[in-house]
Amino acid sequence: MKLHPDPRSTDNIVTAYGSDFIAVGGRVLTRSLLLLPDRLDAQWGPEAYADLAIEHLARLAAFSCDVVLLGTGRRQRFPAPALLRPLIEAGRGFEIMDTAAACRTYNILVGEGRLPLAALILEKDAA
């Protein structure tokens, strides 16, 4: 799906996404990433949802943000409570959704002037 950015904005926004890519400001990324309005970490995260570890979520807890959006790949899956403990202990609000929904929600929140952190898992097709 192609999304149309607000040309007045200088924030990082998702401009397109598919099952195996996310474009941020036109830059196409093909692995899991961490996205804030003023920061992009194209090296964050697991190669697949099954690889999600407490270390990935502990890193998210260190950021100051309004809400953490965890995109769990092609479908919504809920991590075990033990994995979410770093976010809970840091008092971070979080939402868990599939990655496509997380991309859309992230853009809406940025457009509202909020400060979301999107942790987006991209999964490679099985060979």
Image: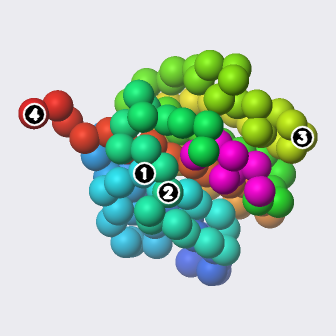
| Quadrant position of residue 47 | top left
Q: Are marks 1 and 2 in contact (CB under 8 Å)?
A: yes
The CA distance from mark 1 to mark 2 is 6 Å
The CA distance from mark 2 to mark 3 is 21 Å
The CA distance from mark 4 to mark 2 is 23 Å
Foreground of the two, 107 or 77: 77
User: Mark 2 falls on what kind of element?
Assistant: loop
| Amino acid at dot 3 | Gly
Measured along the vertical axis of the image, is residue 97 above or below residue 61?
above
Name the magenta segment's main secondary structure: helix
Q: Which residue is mark 1?
A: 32
Give the total number of marks visible in the rendering. 4
- Picture coordinates of residue 3, whole percent (x, y): 45, 56
- Asked if residue 22 lies in the magenta stretch, the reply is no
| Amino acid at dot 4 | Ala
Q: Which class describes the residues within 10 Å of circle 4: few (<14), some (14-19), or many (20+)? A: few
Tell me the tag on residue 91: 3
Q: Residue at x 59, y 23 (%)?
A: 79
Q: Earlier in the sequence, mark 2 or mark 3?
A: 2
Q: Earlier in the sequence, mark 4 or mark 1?
A: 1
Q: Which residues are magenta?
A: 56-62
Q: Residue at x 69, y 23 (%)?
A: 82
